[in-house]
Amino acid sequence: MKKKENDIRPIILEAGEGRTYRCGNMTAIFKADEQETDEKYSVSEWWLEPNSMGPGAHQHQDNDEVFYVLEGCCSFLIGDQWTEADKGTFLRIPAKTMHDFANRTDQKTGILNFYIPGGFERNMPAIVKWFKDNPNS
């Protein structure tokens, strides 16, 4: 059941809190889902272990994504070009743009993600299952 806009309440989470999803060498921690934001956006942290690949190249037809590097250095594919993004780097990926991310370093890296409008969290059970079924990916 969709919440009424006036039912939306503040969210306060400590470091590491949220809904955690293990995806192979990645861990996603969802901070705010579409139900908590009146379907306006979803917010999540993505942590990648050293020398690990991200989700694989993909695009979203109707959703923009914003990324902010929290820790380490993250490689981002935008269109057909990879770019290195150090801590503090901001990236906006418009809808219909091929993209991916990976950690090509020897240290863990973390990125904050805003998915606009919300709803990405609906995909997480299938993504977790895919990584369990494909452990070498």
Image (tube, rainbow, N blue to C red):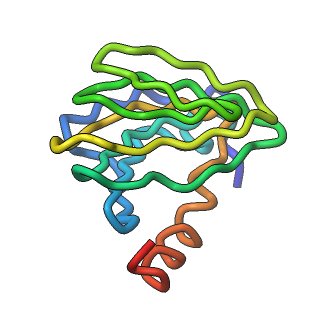
Relative to 27, does residue 84 appear above or below in the rendering?
above
* Near-viewer residue (94 or 63): 94
Regarding residue 111, the answer to whether it shows in the image is yes
What residue is shown at x 75% (from left), y 43% (from top)?
60
Residue 37 horizontal/vertical position (percent):
59, 32
Residue sitting at x 35%, y 25%: 69
Q: Looking at this rendering, what residue extends furthest in the front direction?
A: 81
Whole-percent x, y for residue 99 in the image = 63, 39
| Left or right placement of residue 56 versus residue 97 in this view | left
Q: How many marks?
A: 0
Tell whether 120 sits left or right of 21: right
Please name whichever residue, 68 or 20, is drawn nearer the observer in this view of the structure.
68
Residue 110 lies, in percent from the top left, at 30, 36
Image location (x, y in percent) of residue 1 = 70, 55
For the C terminus, the image quarter is: bottom left
Q: Quadrant of residue 84?
A: top left
Q: Image quarter for residue 124?
A: bottom right
Question: Compared to 110, does 94 lie above or below?
Answer: above
Q: Position of 76 compared to 86: left or right?
A: right
The answer to whether residue 41 is above or below residue 136 is: above
Q: Residue at x 40, y 31 (%)?
A: 112
> Quadrant location of residue 88?
top left
Residue ID at (41%, 45%):
102
Q: Is residue 7 visible?
A: no
Horizontal side, residue 56 vs residue 25: left or right: right
| Residue farthest along the bottom direction in this orientation | 133
